[in-house]
């Protein structure tokens, strides 16, 4: 076994590998760029080596620098994590030449399966069902359009060396193919150092299901069940679960055996994932193979009890698999939410900045439910523009799918983040969605269910009553604190109190009576009484307690004369008044938002890649105006209405903040 390994990655996956290595008694070496000097993975590792500037192409993607770091520290092996160099055939070859072990598959398997084009050719040769498409290298947009016309729309344009949704576009017409081809090539070159793309038929109403395989260097390969990753946006997974609500035992076995046969055909000898696109009728087609550890591997670990990172390390050290196929048992259900630094209200555009607040829910097992949080950040840390915007992966495990979803919803409500925009409100709302709960999924789910984008809904029904109760409870605690500060605290022998209040939940009005009871207080809302218990203190970002006998968590943010609450996917500004204050508040005029309809504002911090228009130019609705790059993704900003360009404030190469004015319309 190795004494010391180097992790050629950053963020949560680097921290994840360090945890397992530490448990195995193996020392670790972190590598970091200038932007990651204060990163969590650097702090966690036994040693750390600076490998270059912030841009990945000058640090994390430079093979020579990783090899040099291994030699300088005496690291015997390298775990690549996912992304970066994890699927570059040249990387394990360079390590082998330096006498360093690659904790991953052999270069031949990477060449055969890691390349999206070559993997499809290998699958076709092995009589594996594949999606119709063109598997050769496409030279230009004209050829791309001809191929798409022959295949039939819609088509998927994909980076050959891609992953994580980078270098991927769906096109419904020839114009979209031409533009998508250019964007996919550019993103692929910037993210993977390889701009080759290919085109395949996009299956309508598909589901994304993948099989986890594990092989050793002695010819043994097994599969560890499946994961469903159909909840995606921009072709990037948002929520994963294991097992899939679609599959039955027979379909699971057929997919697993096919994945194992394909892995054996290429001599696969590590953890890897064979991905399939599945129809609602349980038909399936080989999509690609990821020759690395997947982002969503924790859900498989939770239902199998197998540490995939440990197995990868043991296999790389030459050990045989400790499991046979008959040893693999699936236990319960697991759900994973990817928490991103992005603004769901602004079409999920990336967000950067400092994590002023970062308070994840408590991890561990309680009453058969397990909560796990894989992260690479900390409170006070910074989310930069240079890397993937993932903050954490929140994982729950329970005996049933319904229980795992409920545990995930509760954990999301208890996850407090401030300082940047994030997608927890969206994830929380999704956990409450009837279609998600029913398991009737497809990769078009988000586009179909949120066609106008996402905006946290106003609370309704019992959720509204719970939030009104929490708002009244918070107001009560704050008022008690004020009375103590001013010396107005009642003596211990004081009689029980009752206070009438009006709780404004956004525009909803609720009549409330706060009454002192043994062990806490009761809140009567619109005539219905709710016993309330909580140890919440002013300043805490999450209110946790019991309302009406039910344990809940509510996110709390201070606003002028009140608090903003979010719970169970709903959000509202809450203000608590006396009856006289409520009468006066009703007379106050509403504040009007400034009109920015004649300006194009930058929707996220980013770099201007191109300005596509000029002053005086007339544009039509949908025409591209400029391209802004953020976190390795190129975002095309389009005209929302017909107009004429009056003034351009930005130029190519400018670094812009959120809401910076890019151009103005006449």
Image (spheres, rainbow, N blue to C red):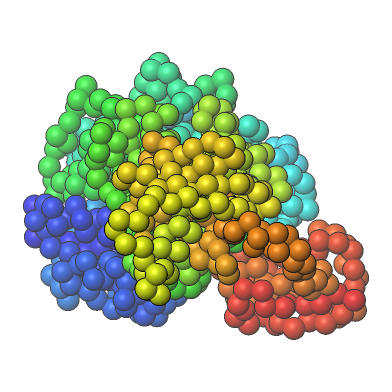
- Where residue 350 appears, as percent x and y from the top left, is 55, 64
Residue 85 falls left or right of residue 207: left
Residue at the spot 32% in from the left edge and 27% down from the top edge: 399
Residue at the spot 22% in from the left edge and 74% down from the top edge: 48
Query: Relative to 68, is 97 above or below?
Result: above
- Where residue 448 appears, as percent x and y from the top left, is 67, 39
Query: Relative to 385, is 473 above or below?
Result: above
> Which part of the image, by quadrant, shows the C terminus?
bottom right
Q: For this rendering, which residue is in front, 312 or 96?
A: 312
Residue at the spot 73% in from the left edge and 77% down from the top edge: 662
Residue 479 visible within the image: yes
Residue 438 falls left or right of residue 94: right
Q: For this rendering, which residue is in front, 87 or 563?
A: 563
Query: Relative to 588, is 445 above or below?
Result: above
Residue found at the very far top of the displayed protein: 250
Residue at the spot 40% in from the left edge and 37% down from the top edge: 550
Residue 223 visible within the image: no
Q: For this rendering, which residue is in front, 241 or 586?
A: 586
- Where residue 235 appears, as percent x and y from the top left, is 56, 48
Q: For this rendering, which residue is in front, 274 or 545?
A: 545
- Where residue 517 appears, as percent x and y from the top left, is 37, 44
> How many numbered callouts?
0
Residue 523 falls left or right of residue 14: right
């Amino acid at each position: 076994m190795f004494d010391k390994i180097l992790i050629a990655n950053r963020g949560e996956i680097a921290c994840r590998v360090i945890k397992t290595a530490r448990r195995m008694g193996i020392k670790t070496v972190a590598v970091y760029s200038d932007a990651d000097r204060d990163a969590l993975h650097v702090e966690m590792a036994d040693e750390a080596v600076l490998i270059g500037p912030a841009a990945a192409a000058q640090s994390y993607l430079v093979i020579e620098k990783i090899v040099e770091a291994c030699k300088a520290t005496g690291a015997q092996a390298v775990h690549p994590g996912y992304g970066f160099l994890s699927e570059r055939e040249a990387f394990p070859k360079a390590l082998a030449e330096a006498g360093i072990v690659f904790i991953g598959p052999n270069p031949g398997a990477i060449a055969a399966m890691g390349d999206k084009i070559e993997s499809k050719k290998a699958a076709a040769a092995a009589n594996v069902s594949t999606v119709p498409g063109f598997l050769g290298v496409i030279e230009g947009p004209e050829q791309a359009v001809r191929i798409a016309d022959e295949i039939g729309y819609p088509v998927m344009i994909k980076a050959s060396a891609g992953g994580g949704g980078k270098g991927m576009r769906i096109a419904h017409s020839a114009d979209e193919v031409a533009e998508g081809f250019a964007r996919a090539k550019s993103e692929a070159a910037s993210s993977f150092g390889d701009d080759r793309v290919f085109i395949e038929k996009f299956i309508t109403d598909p589901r994304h299901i993948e099989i986890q395989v594990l092989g050793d260097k002695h010819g043994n390969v097994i599969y560890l069940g499946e994961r469903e990753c159909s909840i995606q946006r921009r072709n990037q997974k948002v929520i994963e679960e294991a097992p899939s609500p679609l599959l039955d035992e027979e379909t699971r076995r057929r997919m697993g055996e096919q994945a194992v046969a394909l892995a054996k055909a290429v001599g696969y000898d590590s953890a890897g994932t064979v991905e399939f696109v599945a129809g609602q009728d349980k038909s399936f087609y080989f999509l690609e193979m990821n020759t690395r550890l997947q982002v969503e591997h924790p859900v498989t670990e939770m239902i199998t009890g197998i540490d995939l990172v440990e197995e990868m390390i043991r296999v790389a050290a030459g050990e045989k698999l400790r499991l046979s196929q008959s040893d693999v048992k699936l236990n319960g259900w697991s759900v994973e939410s990817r928490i991103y630094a992005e603004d769901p209200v602004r079409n999920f555009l990336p967000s950067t900045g400092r994590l002023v607040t970062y308070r994840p829910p408590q991890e561990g097992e309680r009453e058969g439910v397990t909560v796990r949080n894989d992260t690479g950040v900390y409170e006070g840390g910074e989310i930069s523009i240079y890397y993937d915007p993932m903050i954490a992966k929140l994982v729950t495990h329970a005996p049933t799918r319904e229980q795992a979803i409920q545990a995930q919803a509760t954990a999301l409500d208890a996850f407090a983040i401030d300082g940047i925009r994030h997608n927890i409100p969206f994830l929380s709302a999704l956990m409450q969605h009837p279609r998600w709960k029913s398991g009737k999924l497809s990769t078009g789910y988000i586009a179909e269910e949120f066609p106008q984008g996402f905006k946290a809904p106003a609370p309704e029904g019992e959720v509204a009553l719970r939030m009104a109760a929490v708002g009244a409870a918070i107001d009560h605690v704050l008022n008690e604190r004020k009375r103590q500060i001013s010396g107005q605290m009642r003596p211990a022998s004081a009689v029980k109190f009752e206070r009438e209040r009006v709780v404004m939940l956004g525009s909803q009005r609720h009549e409330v009576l706060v009454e002192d009871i043994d062990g806490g207080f009761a809140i009567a809302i619109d005539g219905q009484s709710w016993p309330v218990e909580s140890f919440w203190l002013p300043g805490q970002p999450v209110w946790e307690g019991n309302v009406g006998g039910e344990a809940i968590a509510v996110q709390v943010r201070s606003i002028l004369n009140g608090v903003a609450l979010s719970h169970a996917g709903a959000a509202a500004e809450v203000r608590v008044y006396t009856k006289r204050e409520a009468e006066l508040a009703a007379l106050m005029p509403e504040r009007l938002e400034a009109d920015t309809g004649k300006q194009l504002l930058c929707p996220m911090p980013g770099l201007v890649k191109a300005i596509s228009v000029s002053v005086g130019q007339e544009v039509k609705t949908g025409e591209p105006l400029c391209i802004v790059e953020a976190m390795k993704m190129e975002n095309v900003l389009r005209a929302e209405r017909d107009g004429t360009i009056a003034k351009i404030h930005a130029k190519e190469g400018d670094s812009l903040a959120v809401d910076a004015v890019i151009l103005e319309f006449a």
